[in-house]
Image (spheres, coloured by chain):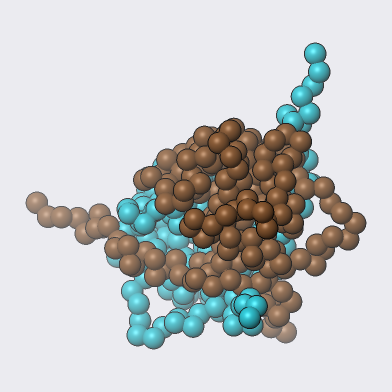
Chain colours: A brown, B cyan
Amino acid sequence: MTIVSTEHRLSAEGFKHAFRLHPGGVAIVTADIGEGPKAMTVSSLFSVSIDPPTLVFSASAMSSSTPTILSADTVVVHMLSSSNIDLAKLCATSGSARFGDDVKWDRLPTGEPYYPGASSWIRGKVVNRVDVHGSVLIIVEALEVKPQEQDSDTHAEPLVYHSRNWFSLGETALVREKS
Amino acid sequence: MTIVSTEHRLSAEGFKHAFRLHPGGVAIVTADIGEGPKAMTVSSLFSVSIDPPTLVFSASAMSSSTPTILSADTVVVHMLSSSNIDLAKLCATSGSARFGDDVKWDRLPTGEPYYPGASSWIRGKVVNRVDVHGSVLIIVEALEVKPQEQDSDTHAEPLVYHSRNWFSLGETALVREKS
């Protein structure tokens, strides 16, 4: 009997190295299950269905906000632009005062905590949770979106996290087509 | 009895508008289930666990390659840099010859089709599939990564898709810290 080489598991280092090349848009998820507002920064958000409008993100076992996010019936998912970088860092820093006196936050009429300064947000209902080796994929059906202000954020530049750095997707980052 | 307003579903337009601000790194997934090589471009890839190394992406019901990807036991997930933009476009274009004579592709010793020119790739085993309203989340445990060449791609700039445009995450896109 021989060990089948294809069943060798990749090392954590090899995996991380391959993913160094893979950036993610930055989002913040907030929720409150009656124990106070919680928030976490994620770079694992994507849209998975338009009808009904559904998104997914991953909650790492390592975040202190994860137990709240996992138990919540509804969450607010904020999509961030580069002008929201301070908020992104705040909610990515262990032990930070994410709802402190100097942080602009509020509650929606439905009760969820949220950051009104985020360029966009979606309030949604958690419809499924999928455990993947301790992390959890959270599947959310969208119920409500940030009201659009006239001309607001038409030119907002999305915030991207990549290889421990923050990037802004402005004009200068556009790939020029070969002619 | 009144209709509870919070259960109103968000319109597809509102949802898409909110997600316009949310970019994604670009990847290509390839597989062959004995019916010839297939490939699709996705912007929904993220790493979900390091131990064991596990990733997830979403296969849209709208791609012609989805039936193959859904049935495959193993897939190759390619992380792309801006130098791979032609490949990204090829595999995102309906009806294109993704494995045509002028396309540089090969097979791994284990049989999967792949693009050796991609800046990085991971071969993995599909360990779970989660249906979300017709789209499918595919959860993949990593088995093997592209061998690292000396000094290769140390400075590769990831390719990002956002609001129907392609972006490159180079130095100029770095957010400068306030001092």
Q: In the image, what residue occupies the spot 77% across and 24% down? A: B4
Say whether residue A156 is visible.
Answer: yes
- Residue B73: x and y, percent? 37, 48
Task: State left or right for residue B105 relative to residue A140.
Answer: left
Q: Is residue A23 above or below residue B62?
A: below
Task: State left or right for residue B37 relative to residue B133.
Answer: left
- Residue A132: x and y, percent? 40, 44
Quadrant location of the C terminus of chain B in the rendered image: bottom right
Looking at the picture, tell me which residue is in the foreground, B76 or A104.
A104
Looking at the picture, tell me which residue is in the foreground, A131 or B82.
A131
Residue extending farthest top: B1
Q: In the image, what residue occupies the spot 63% across and 51% down? A: A99
Looking at the picture, tell me which residue is in the foreground, B4 or B69.
B4
**Splitting the image into 4 quarters, where does residue B89 fall?**
bottom right
Q: In the image, what residue occupies the spot 58% across and 33% down? A: A34
Quadrant location of the N terminus of chain B in the rendered image: top right
- Residue B178: x and y, percent? 65, 78
- Residue A60: x and y, percent? 45, 50
